[in-house]
Amino acid sequence: MFGCSGEISGNNESHIKDYTVTPIGAPINTPGGGTITAFKFSSAAIERRFDVYLPPGYNNSKNQRYPVLYMHDGQNLFFPERCFIWEWNLDDNIEYLIEQGKIQKIIAVGIDNAETDRLTEFVTDQAKSYTKLLMSIKNHIDKTYRTLPDREYTGLMGASAGAATTLYAAHHHPETFGLLGIYSIYAPYSDIYGMIKNNEHARFHKVYIAAGAGEVYNLNQARRIKALFEAKGYTDDELYYYEETPMANIMNKRGKDGYGVKERT
């Protein structure tokens, strides 16, 4: 189960010390003018693919720095042939929102999960090892790209068990992550609630929680987590909560509106 101390922030043990990062192929151009490049992270303990999305104009804006969104389950984010549930079409959605003036340009990083060991890695003590991987990749991203590295510009987002590991990593590193996205959370262990309630060091700039009413277990957890944040004094400007029914309707509506989100099949 999760550890809940939240006291590991900022020490050397929070990163993997010796690792290499190598590109996998050439950058792929997105329809909206961005690029996606795949990389292989290698250390003695772990090897993992991650993808880096750069927004339109990144290579032409030599002095501009960008917020960064880190996401789990990288297989589901960009390429339909890699996804194991359905594709988020993350690049299409980002570029649509940029075009509509709803968000500023961002860098997005998708980290692959451990496939058959995904649940173990996300919601047991192995989350500590995954968090080290996440922090090491962030270290690489900040050294390699023109980021805005501070917590108010650094987001962490995940769905289902990925939402649970978002809460775990953010509460262990509140100095690093200030923006959280919690979607359809699946947290089979109660430790997650104590971690939110008892960690006095974690105060986030924005927390977004969403679940579909058809997801009974996930919805109950989402409501409980919302209540915990409210009990800690989060205001409407800091805490966003959204429910929609059923999940298939979300997919269909957004697809028709041009968000580029695929329908479930």
Image: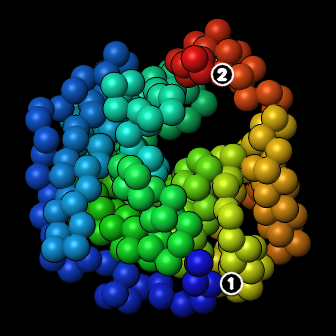
- Mark 2 neighbour density, 10 Å: few (under 14) some (14–19) many (20 or more): some
Quarter of image, res 189: bottom right
Q: Is residue 88 visible?
A: no
Please state the horizontal and vertical placement of residue 53, each as a whole percent of the image: 33, 38
Q: Locate residue 106 relative to residue 235 in the image: left or right.
A: left
Q: Earlier in the sequence, mark 1 or mark 2?
A: 1
As drawn, 63 above or below 15: above
Residue for badge 2: 251
If the image is split into quadrants, where does the C terminus sit? top right
Q: Is residue 130 visible?
A: yes
Residue for badge 1: 199
Please state the horizontal and vertical placement of residue 154, each as a whole percent of the image: 48, 58
The amino acid type found where label 1 is placed reads Asn
The amino acid type found where label 2 is placed reads Met
Could you tell me which residue is drawn at 58 percent across and 84 percent down? 3
**Cα distance between the residues tagged 1 and 2:** 35 Å
